[in-house]
Image: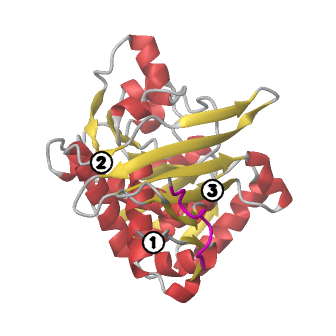
Amino acid sequence: MKTPSFKIIGASAIKEWMDNHSQEIFELVKEAYVLHSKALALNPDSYFLRFPSEQKNRIIALPASLEDQAPIAGIKWIASFPDNIEDGLDRASAVLIINDRKTGYPRACLEGSVISAGRTAASAAVGAQYLHPTPGRINRLCVVGCGLIAYQSIELLVRLGWKIGCLSVVDTSEQRGATFAKKCREAFKIDADVDFLAGAVPQSDMVLFATSAGTPHVKDPVMFRHAPTVLHMSLRDLSPEVVLSAQNVVDDIDHCLKAQTSLHLTEQQVGSRNFVSGNAADLIEGRVLPDRTRVRIFSPFGMGILDLAVARAILKDINEAAANAIPDFFPVPYAA
């Protein structure tokens, strides 16, 4: 067997593909959730590398495998350094290594942050589609945390045909919030204004949390008594009291109830997981129905199988000219 070559695919080629395949990305994420529920995907625990002197910084390894008709394996290595934004850099940076399932050889290294943000936005869209009382329409969307994930989540919803009446924007930085609101007004033609949390949430039928919070800062369940849909993408914003007042849906319960997420803190407080109604596949396949009488919270931890599903499609479609092949990357096989 010929020694395989190795490809490196950068952000520009990946972003071009992602921009042109919004509906496909949404469907790929849905399919990956269902494959996982049928034991046709492997998603081991994520591994966190933390730094004792820099508690808010971390690098995470997410190994995964898809075991369907076109099996593929890989690992995402993604860093989160929140202070990067003060220096004009992205908070998250990543690479995604794809392995051949027949030989185990790495096939490619893809820039991972564009894929990660895109599949996270698609995950948010899945939660919105199956939990919101009016799929395809949001009267007022409250965005808490004005970064890339929030922007791409709105962008994907718009591309999927959602109608958004207006935006309330909340951020710890007033300047960042104002810039985000202006960007949304210009890009999506949506009325967007900077607001404060206690005022915006009770007026919104959907709330998107995309912060870098490490501990709960939203603690009053009364704020959600009007039963909005909450896309809790940042996982650590809500207190156990808020979680316990809600219908909670996750992507995978074992993943979500760890690493001091809001759900993990709630489990530690009550001693059970009974407050979780089900997972994304349960929503998609109708085993869990949205409870319109109370707040509905979708809390996806972020599964490596989603990155793999998108990466597999990119590798299938990508123009060879956009992939930098290194034919002699691997050594000549040892001959006994």
Q: Give the mark nearer the N terminus: 1 vs 2.
A: 1
The span picked out in magenta is 325-335
Q: Give the mark nearer the N terminus: 1 vs 3.
A: 1
* Residue 35 placement (x, y as % from top left): 24, 51
Residue 328 within the segment the image draws in magenta = yes
* Residue 11 placement (x, y as % from top left): 62, 73
Q: In this view, does 228 lie to the left or right of 94?
A: left
Q: Residue 195 carries which label?
A: none
Residue type indicated by callout 1: Lys
Q: Is residue 168 left or right of residue 21?
A: right
* 1 vs 3, front mark: 1
Residue 164 seen anywhere in this rendered image of the structure: no
Name the outermost residue toward the front.
336
Q: Quadrant of residue 139?
A: bottom left
As displayed, is residue 71 above or below residue 1? above
Residue 173 within the segment the image draws in magenta = no
Dot 2 corresponds to which residue? 41
Q: Which mark is residue 2?
A: 1
| Contact check, label 1 and label 2, Cβ < 8 Å | no
Residue type indicated by callout 3: Ala
Q: How far apart are marks 1 and 3 (CA)?
A: 30 Å
The residue shown at (62%, 63%) is 193
Q: How far apart are marks 1 and 2 (CA)?
A: 29 Å
- Taking depth in this image into account, of 206 and 195 the one nearest to the observer is 206
Q: In which quarter of the image is residue 282?
A: top left
The residue shown at (58%, 76%) is 327
Residue type indicated by callout 2: Ala
The residue shown at (41%, 18%) is 267
